[in-house]
Amino acid sequence: MEDAGVDALRQHADPAAPQRITVLSGGVGGAKFARGLRHYVQRVGADRAGDTPAPATVTCVVNTGDDMWLNGLRVCPDLDSVMYGLAGVNDRERGWGRAGESERVSAELLAYGVGADWFTLGDLDLATHIARTQMLREGTGLVEATRVLASRWDLGATLLPATEHEVETRVQVGDHPGDTLHFEEWWVRHRAALPARRFLHDGAPSAVPAPGVLDAIAGADLLILAPSNPIVSIGAILAIPGIREALRAAGAPVIGVSPIIGGAHVLGMAAQCLRAVGAEVSAAGVAEHLGSAGEPEGLLDGWLMDTTDAGSVARVEAHGIRAAAVPLLMTTDALTADIVHAVHQLAARVVADR
Ligand code: GDP
Ligand code: CA
């Protein structure tokens, strides 16, 4: 007798499931999405066991705009959120960092009067930054350093930093163009209370995509924009010259998932970020900000919104973007896998209509 679990998996039979999936991702929202994507791939794999031995490969191109030097260490918040999330060692209650964390080292640093009291590095998390920094100091690139860190866990996905260059997202908070803060300082220290005038991607013009990123985009048969912050996560990845062009040139459909549900972000500060760039804080507004693949500079072939926003499907489709509405709360990996299933169905519509 087959167990009920396999039966449940079978209901998601998906004969034309994609084989190479590449997703652009920020930190916490991206990590939740990546877990659901892995669940989806395993579900499809279980369903097709026997005839298709190779499961789909998942590559996450992760934002590096929030990376910073702190206490002499290279900290990569979004890469670490995705790594910890996929490894299952993330702190779900806080929403960031490692579970079961302690802060003895940070407390000692503050006793010496060094370190940033607004950005506490946990002891377990510090080991990640020390290991990464050691590799970078020895001349290892961030792609290889990330591979070595990730190889400790069974992630079921490849993590690629968007770039190995130090491109920093900064926030202009005053009238003067020079009144800027590092994004993490604006967000974590000031809780985004200082009104953002604009976001800058410092160093972007001379940066190039990290090795492997353009191939992961060109070689994919499904490209997904995770429900990550459209400005400082997805936008910071797109600021690296060559990435937007690669997405537009790719043969695979580009499908985005809305981080905005019913006019508000689920968590974080996407609303403040959207307002700062003059975009409407709505699912349709984010789609219009990212643009239709049929428009100059636009990206989207498909856009997935929450059922709350079903009324906006026609507005988005008027731009030539295929749209659908399904529940978009990533409460469990299984529910998030259902979102990925809907992404795949939307992609199939895009391909069928070509
Ligand atoms: P960060 O780098 O840690 O800020 O994380 P991301 O940029 O990857 O993700 C932040 C975005 O994820 C926010 O704009 C949230 O609205 C969105 N988000 C978080 N949880 C959910 C969810 O359950 N569903 C959807 N659709 N979006 C979510
Ligand atoms: Ca981030």
Image: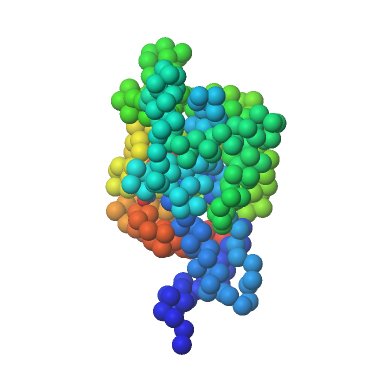
In percent of width and height, residue 80 lies at 50, 41
In the depicted structure, whether residue 42 falls above or below residue 270: below
In the depicted structure, whether residue 257 falls above or below residue 68: below
In percent of width and height, residue 53 lies at 64, 71
Front residue of 23 and 104: 104
| Colour logic | rainbow
Number of marks in picture: 0
In the depicted structure, whether residue 25 falls above or below residue 203: below
Would you say 104 lies left or right of 64 here?
left
Question: Residue pushed farthest bottom?
Answer: 1
The quarter in which the C terminus is drawn is bottom right
At x 33% / y 29%, what residue is drawn? 191
At x 66% / y 53%, what residue is drawn? 219
Does residue 240 show up?
no
**Ligand 1 positioned in quadrant:** top left
Does residue 146 show up?
yes
At x 41% / y 79%, what residue is drawn? 4
In percent of width and height, residue 79 lies at 52, 41
Front residue of 145 and 11: 145
Front residue of 181 and 24: 181
In the depicted structure, whether residue 212 falls above or below residue 275: below
In percent of width and height, residue 312 lies at 34, 50
Q: Quadrant of residue 156?
A: bottom right
Q: Quadrant of residue 310?
A: bottom left
At x 66% / y 29%, what residue is drawn? 137
Q: Quadrant of residue 110?
A: top left
